[in-house]
Image (cartoon, grey):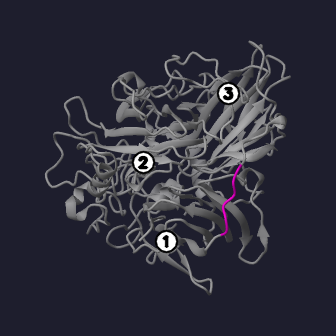
């Protein structure tokens, strides 16, 4: 068998023949050679602001946001457009895009969104998935009907890809909302399609319960093919994002394009206008710019030669294991334990450029990759030997939960999937005509924190985007980052309980040498022995309302995992090796966070306050892991 890195190298460089349609016959598929894709020919696309519904006048901002299929220019001209899924305002078809338009919210003012699954064709029939769905996982499984949904299907023979209507449910990542509006993985719903097969479940196990809870709290009802979520925005100003969260299929729905920014502004934890670089895009500005505050989502993708998104259609892509699968082994036939694309995509375009002025810019970075950890740096030569010298520093001013206690000057930004980094880059004094490059020195494979690990391929995934410095258009009124005073940050009080949690892998009991069959969460007993739990096992994390708890996350696997806890923000206390003393959090981790990197063979300790009763989840945000058991429900309250 190939190692993970060896197989990735083989697929970055050229054409590969892959098992693409398992169970229905194999067909050769030509992959696009990422080295042959022209770089820095397209300008960076800045996501416009999502338009709300007309007729506002009440103390809540209302949106109707749907999901549709569209064709989008992701690769440069000379390549065909790419079919993706995107969010958009249902009242304006022109707004559908990937990433979706940005929802601008105000602290203390609620936002209410009707999320609609509109994955239907022109005749009202459902659209199958763009990517291969493994129906052997514990997943939403509409085909199982009302009694078999949200379970392990347990097929008697190796199935082909699921080809039915696609379940969706949107999660506001970083939100602080009631459980009915959190995007619980079993609260999914299918589109209202005229040809949904008889016997299919059209909604998840928790959809009706959460619809009833929503109606009791806010009135109104949910219509088929949609859900209405209420976001209170009673938290610190912060960079958040929305994405799909349906059980066992999140990796595919997000990879297909379902993500967008949600920016919360105002309140006592924000800064007055003019202090930080601006402006940012605003409603109705037509995307004209120039903007000096820009949200930037970085994702890795692979493409077929015809411009289509490529995602592996069989387990053989990961470790060359061609079976046997069901029922003669316990290895999923289609699921890959991890996947890393061969091209870097920024705001929906591969390797774009951005014209900047010699002034300060605010970039809200989001790692939107399925599994790739990014190690970002600004350099003068994108092909320089790694590690390359930094040409400009990042001034890190915020993380997932808003502003840090004080700005931190860094030569790099290390950011795992789902983490956000609010940074200022000061181009003041850089000569017009200068070209600078945002590069990635993270690995082309699983991240484990090894500083000596080989970096990404400098000719492809080691490059991200280019900055081209132009003449100044006017004065810069923003405050230099080294003189900024950020809003005060209140620390959490003492914890009343400590929970010991485990990150685990499960190897095959049938096939030696294959990769993991599942990745799991669990608990650790008083002797340090871990015990795994499945998604469907009884809840083990159940804080009481108002509790402050320490969670000790013991990572028994060889890889680092970004762990995300829904509904709350936490502080990182420290990390300690299984056999060593504590190490304090990194300087950029000293604010509020909702996602933290748990390094292998270490204990990562976080402290959180649980102030709202309800049913939520915590999970690894490597999406391939999340979709195959590395996610657990937790309940606040009885």
- The quadrant in which residue 491 appears is bottom right
Highlighted magenta segment, given as a residue range: 489-494
Pick the residue in front: 181 or 99.
181
The numbered dot on residue 541 is 1
Lower position in the chain sequence, tag 2 or tag 1: 2
SS at mark 2?
Answer: helix
Lower position in the chain sequence, tag 2 or tag 3: 2
The numbered dot on residue 273 is 3
572 sits to left or right of 128:
right
Compute the Cα span from label 2 to label 1.
28 Å
Q: Nearer the viewer, mark 2 or mark 1?
A: 1
Image point 49% across, 39% down: which residue?
A: 31
Query: In which quadrant is the C terminus drawn?
Result: bottom left
Residue 385 placed where, x, y %? Answer: 81, 42
Please check the rendered image and state whether residue 478 is part of the magenta-colored stretch, yes or no. no
Compute the Cα span from label 2 to label 3.
39 Å
- State the predominant SS element of the stretch in magenta: loop
Q: Nearer the viewer, mark 2 or mark 3?
A: 3
Residue 289 placed where, x, y %? Answer: 61, 17
């Amino acid at each position: 068998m190939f190692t993970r890195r060896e197989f990735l190298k083989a697929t970055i460089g050229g054409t590969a023949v892959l098992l693409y349609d398992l169970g229905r016959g194999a067909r050769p598929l030509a992959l696009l050679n990422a080295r042959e894709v022209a770089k820095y020919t397209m300008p960076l696309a800045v996501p416009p602001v999502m338009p709300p519904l007309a007729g506002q006048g009440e103390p809540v901002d209302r949106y109707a946001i749907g999901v549709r299929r569209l064709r989008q220019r992701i690769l440069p001209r000379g390549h065909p457009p790419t079919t993706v899924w995107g969010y958009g305002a249902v009242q304006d078809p022109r707004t559908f895009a990937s990433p979706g338009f940005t929802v601008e919210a105000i602290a203390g003012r609620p936002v209410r969104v009707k999320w609609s699954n509109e994955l239907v064709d022109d005749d009202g029939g459902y659209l199958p998935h763009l990517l291969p769905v493994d129906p052997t996982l514990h997943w939403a499984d509409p085909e199982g009907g009302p009694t078999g949904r949200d379970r392990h299907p347990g097929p008697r023979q190796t199935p082909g890809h699921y080809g039915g209507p696609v379940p969706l449910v949107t999660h506001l990542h970083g939100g602080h909302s009631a459980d009915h509006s959190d995007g619980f993985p079993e609260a999914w719903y299918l589109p209202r399609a005229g040809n949904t097969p008889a016997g299919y479940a059209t909604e998840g196990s928790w959809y009706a319960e959460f619809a009833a809870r929503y109606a009791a709290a806010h009135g109104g009802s949910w219509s088929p093919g949609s859900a209405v979520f209420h976001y209170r925005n009673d938290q610190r100003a912060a960079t958040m994002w929305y994405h799909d969260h349906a059980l066992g299929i999140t990796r595919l729905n997000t990879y297909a394009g379902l993500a967008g920014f949600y920016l919360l502004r105002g309140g006592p934890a924000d800064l007055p206008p003019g202090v930080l670089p601006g402006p940012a895009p605003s409603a109705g500005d037509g995307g004209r710019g120039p903007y000096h505050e820009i949200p930037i989502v970085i994702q890795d993708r692979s493409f077929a030669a015809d411009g289509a998104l490529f995602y592996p259609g069989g387990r053989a892509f990961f470790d060359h294991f061609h079976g046997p699968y069901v029922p003669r082994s316990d290895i999923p036939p289609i699921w890959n334990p991890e996947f890393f694309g061969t091209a870097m995509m920024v705001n929906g375009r591969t390797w774009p450029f951005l014209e900047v002025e010699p002034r300060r810019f605010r970039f809200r970075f989001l790692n939107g990759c399925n599994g790739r950890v990014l190690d970002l740096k600004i350099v003068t030569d994108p092909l320089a030997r790694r590690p390359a010298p930094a040409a400009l520093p990042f001034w890190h001013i915020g993380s997932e939960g808003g502003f840090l206690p004080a700005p931190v000057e860094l030569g790099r930004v290390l950011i795992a999937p789902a983490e956000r980094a609010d940074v200022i880059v000061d181009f003041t004094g850089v000569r017009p005509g200068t070209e600078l490059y945002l590069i990635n020195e993270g690995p082309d494979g699983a991240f484990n924190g090894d500083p000596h690990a080989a970096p990404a391929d400098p000719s492809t995934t080691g490059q991200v985007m280019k900055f081209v410095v132009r003449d100044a258009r006017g004065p810069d009124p923003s405050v230099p980052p080294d003189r900024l005073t950020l809003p005060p940050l209140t620390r959490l009080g003492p914890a009343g309980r400590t929970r010991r949690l485990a990150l685990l892998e499960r190897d095959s009991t049938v096939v030696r040498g294959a990769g993991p069959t599942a990745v799991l969460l669990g608990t650790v007993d008083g002797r340090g022995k871990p015990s795994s739990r499945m998604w469907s096992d009884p809840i083990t994390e159940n804080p009481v309302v108002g509790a402050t708890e320490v969670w000790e996350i013991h990572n028994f696997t060889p890889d680092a995992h970004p762990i995300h806890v829904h509904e709350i923000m936490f502080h990182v206390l420290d990390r300690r090796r299984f056999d060593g003393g504590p190490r304090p959090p990194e300087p950029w981790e000293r604010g509020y966070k909702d996602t933290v990197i748990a390094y292998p063979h270490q204990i990562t300790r976080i402290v959180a306050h649980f102030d709202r009763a309800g049913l939520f989840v915590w999970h690894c945000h490597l999406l391939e892991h999340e979709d195959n058991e590395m996610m657990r429900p937790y309940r606040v309250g009885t």
